[in-house]
Amino acid sequence: MDKNEIEKIITQLRNNSTVKKSKQILADIKHIDSRLNEDVFKLAVVGEFSSGKSTFINAIIGMDLLSHSTEETTATLTYITNVNAKDDRINTCKVNYRSGKSIILKDLSCLSDYTTAQSGNNVAAEISSVEIYVNFINSDYPIMIIDTPGLNGVADDHREITLEEIKKVHACIYVLPLKGISKTDIDFIYIIQHIKIKLYFYRTLKMLSMPMKGKLQREK
């Protein structure tokens, strides 16, 4: 079934008198319609804080971009978009505040000030998201990797924020720490198993060094 056929079905559903009475069905149709018109593949990386999400993403993109530690790190949604090497946005970052204000960073070395719980800023309360533009797969393929806040983080709404983000992506990688699966993991996996996306699991091992681009080096 191609895009045009799906759009015809969506139009027919919207005009159906029974469907018009259901807010849930209309919301689902709106979601399908928005996904149909997306031109970027979205991949969310999820897990508890200190599970290795940021380290895992750094390994995928082949650069030490995101901060990583044994303490809580990622404090806001961080979107990493693969762009053409000639794109005007490359190696820049857009910081979106909850107030509606946004700023552009041209120096990614200060990225942690706007994404981590350890920074001097109140990131979780003040910043809604951060958008980073880099070229990380030696290709122009439109892909976005989303680093989500730790599910057991200090901010009360991190769990809900992550859940809502998962509903918008095409696939999700759930990172499990070396210490093993926790109750937080089990509870959240139980919730997201009903969301119709591709869900993959990755168990972190100690990283010996920064990996070569696109490859992971694991402790043997």
Image: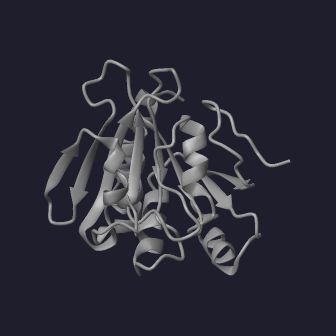
Q: Is residue 141 above or below residue 182?
A: above
In screen coordinates, is 168 left or right of 92? Answer: right
Residue 38 appears in view? no
Which residue is nearer to you in this view: 210 or 181?
Answer: 210
Quadrant of the frame with the N terminus? top right
Residue at figure coordinates x 15%, y 66% from the top left: 99
- Residue at the limit of the structure toward the right, as seen here: 220
Residue at figure coordinates x 44%, y 80% from the top left: 154
Q: Position of residue 200 (x, y in %)?
A: 68, 51
Q: Quadrant of residue 81?
A: top left
Which residue is nearer to you in this view: 40 or 84?
Answer: 84
For the image shown, how many numbered marks are present on the structure? Answer: 0
Q: Quadrant of residue 35?
A: top left
Residue at figure coordinates x 27%, y 31% from the top left: 89
Q: Position of residue 194 (x, y in %)?
A: 61, 64
In screen coordinates, is 13 left or right of 103? Answer: right
Residue at figure coordinates x 47%, y 50% from the top left: 66
Q: Position of residue 204 (x, y in %)?
A: 72, 56
Chosen colour scheme = one colour
Residue 81 appears in view? yes
Q: Position of residue 52 (x, y in %)?
A: 62, 58
